[in-house]
Every structure is written in C-alpha cells, then in structure tokens.
Image (spheres, grey):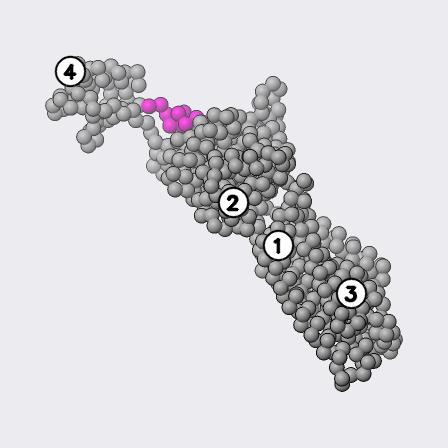
Amino acid sequence: MSPTLVIARLTLREAVRRRLVAACAAITLGLVALSAWGFDRLSHSRSLTSGEVHASVPQALIMFMFMFSFVVALSASAMASPAISAEVDSGVLLTILARPVRRRDVLLGKWLGLAAVLAAYCAAVTSLEVGVVDWVSGFLPPDSLAVGCYLFAEGVVLLTLALLLSTRLPPIASGVVGIALFGAAWLAGVVGSLGATFKIGTLRTVGEVSRYVLPTDGLWRGAIYYLEPQSLISRAVDEAAGGAANPFAVPAAPAWTYLLWVAVWFLAVMTAGLVSFERREL
Amino acid sequence: MRARTAREAAGRPGAPSPAVHTIELRKEFRRTVALAGLSMTVERGEVFGFLGPNGAGKTTAVKLLLGLLRPSGGEAMVLGAPAGDLEARRKIGYLPELFRFQSWLTAREVLRVHWQLLALPSQRAAGAAGEALAAVGLAGRGDDKIASFSKGMQQRLGLAVALLGEPSLVVLDEPTSALDPVGRHDVREVIRRLRASGTTVFLNTHLLDEAEQVCDRVAVVERGRTIAIGALGELLGRQTAVRLRVSGLGEGWWHRFDSFGRWVADGDSHLLEGVEPARVPDLVAAIVAAGGRVGAVVPERQSLEARFLELLGRS
C-alpha cells in the first residue's frame, strides 16, 4: 500500500474513532427528521393552495440544503484545520516523517481521507433529505446527483483551503479563518445580489469577484440550480432580467468556464499547500 | 590539503560508509544559531553518545540528520546517502524526544501503521509487532489504546516503533527521559542488544551515567559545536588513581609506600594518585608483606560528569 493510502486510511479511521462521523450522523438524522415533520406540515397545510405548496416546498428544500451546506463547510474546516499543525505541535508527525515518506504523501493522504468523509456525508445528507421531501411532499429535485456533487465540491474547496492554512497556522486560527472566509464569500454573494437588484455596479462586482476568489458561494449556487424546479428557474430568469435577484434562486447553472476556474483554483491552492508543507521546518 | 567532503567519506571504495558523517553542519533559525558547524563521524556498529547541556543543539542535529530540518550550511551523510534520503530512512529507526502517538490507536495499530509506512511484507507485521512490544516490556499491552498509556509507556512504545524493520541505525533522542529506573535499565539492555547485533546506535542524551554505561564513543557539544569527541577511555584519560582500604598497619602506614605515588586521606580510605596501573599488584603485595590487611582496592578514573564539566569550563 502506498504511503498516501496508509495516511488516508489512518485519517478515515481517526474520523470514525474520534466520533466525528457518529456526531455528524446523529445531528443530521435529527435535522432530517425535523425537516420531514416540517415538510409534512407544509405540504398538507389547509391555508395554502396547491400552487403555493408547489412553489414553497422547493424553496424550503433549498433553505434546508443551505443549512446542510453550512454543516459541510464547518466540518471541512474543522477536520482540516488541525490536520497538519496540531500533529506537528504534538510530535505525531515526527515519527511518521522520519519514515520513507514524502511530505506530499502525508498531505495528499490527509486530503484523500478527509475528502472521503465529506463525500460520504454529502451523498448521505443529499439522498436522505431529498428522499424525505419526496416521500412527504412528492417533490423530487431535477438532478439530486448534481446537488450532491456541488455540495461536495463546495466542501472540498474549503477543505483544501483549510489544509493549506494548517501547514502554517495553529488549528484554531486556520479553522476560524476558513469559516470566516466561507461566511464572507456567502455574504459577498448576497451583496452581489443586492447590487443587481438596486443596480449598484460596485456591489455586483463584489459578488462576482468573491465567487472567483473563494468559489464556495459559486458552487453553492450550482447546487441551488439543480434543486430548482422549472417554475422557480423561470421566475429567477424573470427576476434577473428585471434587475431583481434572490440569493436563494439561480437562473442558470454555473458555466463550464467557471467550473474550469474552480479546477484551476483547486490545483493552485493544493500546490501552495504542498509547497508550504515541504518548506516547513519541523 | 583540502578537507574531505561528507560525500567522499561516505563513498570510500571498498570500505563501508560511516553510519553518520557531518562536516561543518550548520543550522540557523533567523538570528539564532542552533548548530554552529558540527563535524563528526559515527562508525557502523558503534553506540555513539551525543552529549551536551540543554540547548546545545543536540535535537537540532538529530532532526538535520533525519531530514526533518534543512541545513543552513555544511554537509551530512547518513548510511552513505545525503541526510533525509528516502531510501536511507528505510534503514533508520527514530525515537524523538518530544512526541505523541495517535491516542485513538492501540499500540499494535501504531506499530502496524509504521510497518506499512516501511512498505514491509504485511504477513510479517503481526509477528514483528509482537517482538517489538516484547523487547520494550509492553507484551501484554498491545491491544490497549494509547490514550491509556503513561508517558513512560509511550516512550517504551516509541522505542518499539524505532526498532521495527531491523534498522541499521537507531537514533534515540533522550530515550529515558520519562522512564523509571527499571525502564532505564531496560533501555540500556535494548541498546546493548542492538550493539551485539551490529546496529549503530546514535544516543542523544544529557544523562551522563547513561552514556558512560553504554557508549563506545561520545561527542560533547556546546553552543552548536563539538568540543570533544572520542572513545570514552580517551576522553576520560587513563586510570591514574587507586582507592585502598587497609587495616593492621597502624597510624601513618601509607608513608611507607610513598614511592608508589601521592597519598590523599579520604575518610576511612586512602587515595593513591599518580600510580601506574601496572604497579598496583606490587603495591598490594608490599602492603600484605608488611602485615597489612587489604579491605578494598578500587581503581579510580575521572567520572564523565567531571570531565564533561571540565570540558564546558564549569568544573
């Protein structure tokens, strides 16, 4: 087994043994159960017309998935922030790096292990939430697989950034910076929407630029698009044409050029992490 | 005549390369000089003590040899390859001074991870882990979580990890700092067994009695520089004094034997300084012939601690 895979397995085992997986599973199951109750109430409400129910269920699902995207982001940052720095400080990495192991094996192994945890979480949470909503309300998003993939990509972006920060900053600092940047990127997206609504070019530019600097919000918008039924997409297109914008409605899927940029961003941050760790004195 | 480079020393035709060879190895952390030009050779199969006061640069030197730090200057070769070489690291066992293992793993799992990192055949992993645990006195604790281990037990496990895969060079950085007297004795036994099997041991310690008991040669470092290096016997000088306990000859008996050396009364015994070791049997025979009873004859040598302090200019 290659050293990268040995470290990846070790990282996975750590996530399971330290009850991270169990804690995430417990909280997620609780939230999904709560959402099942909520969607049941919403779908069978006598005060809403069927048209209103059809419009509100997808919107409510987007809000719930936003909450799960926050859990994904928080988990990615919390798991990756101590991955290098805490193990350097405690001396765990001294015994490992004295072995015939390259530092890049360690970093890539950790990334792989944590990405596997995120992938499993995104797959589980998307299928559970979408399945529950379909069961209680009959609404099935147009492409659940794409939703899960965008959610995972968003988590991977933050995971890779937190891992880069972890090669230099203490765990708490890199965790706080990662989450703060995630929040700032989302807020910049909302600011961009406000800029579009009120036709303030500078604010719109802030939203656009932030999606390139940290692509978490851009990828979250991809997830929104694949959660929307055609009626919501049409409304979002009309709102966008009319100058109004809603941070929880997206008129189009991310362009392939944007996805290409995300791939470049990912490679650049990962390379920076590898170089930073390679140069770190232990 | 130019100085031999570390690479040349490591590559002498026909001769095995030294286990460790450094020339003017330097390490600076911004304005702090941690290692100011370390030159030394550790031959294969010897137990080499690396001594020095706290902050002398011992751990920095060890980390440079293992490639965990990058040198600011100089050269270092380990097992015939540049320090930090991936293949050479396959043959090195390392016990760091300050370290921890993953608290959520068992001792056996830690050993298995290191076995996998060494890319050794998996079918031998369980047997090797059992042997390593037995060698350090943890035979019954293999399936316990590290979280339940005391600091001393973690240090024993660290030693077991360092012994995995039959390394050619074992680097021990303060291996007994957390151990009780029994543990220290066990570590010394492990070191002796390693020497008997031809393994080179690089022992980084500030415990001089430990070095005195197990090392073939030592280097003394201070402020990042070697101030003395050599076999323990050479470093301490040859024996030049004998302590005797004699009865049956009355007051001032020792004056009758002034020709053997200079006498110093020391409690109920007498120290004879400057005596040739070859003449000690003659002295004992002369005392017995004069009617004396010899209760004790103890050869005295300068202790490593006294020599160490002398070298550091603090005696």
- The answer to whether B29 is drawn above or below residue B7 in the figure is below
Label 3 and label 4 in one chain: no
| Mark 4 and mark 2: Cα distance apart in space | 67 Å
**Mark 1 element type:** helix
Q: Mark 4 points at which residue?
A: B290
Numbered circle sitting on residue A223: 3
Q: What amino acid type is highlighted by mark number 4? A: Ala
| Mark 3 and mark 1: Cα distance apart in space | 26 Å
| Mark 1 and mark 2: Cα distance apart in space | 20 Å
Instruction: Assess whether mark 2 and mark 1 are in contact (beta carbons under 8 angstroms).
Output: no
Q: Does A119 sit left or right of B303 as displayed?
A: right
Residue at image point 62% right, 48% down: A10
Q: Which of B10 and A14 is in front in this view?
A: A14
| Mark 4 and mark 1: Cα distance apart in space | 82 Å
- The answer to whether A35 is drawn above or below residue A76 in the figure is below
- The answer to whether A74 is drawn above or below residue A266 in the figure is below
Q: Which chain carries label 1?
A: A
Nearer mark to the viewer, of 4 and 1: 1
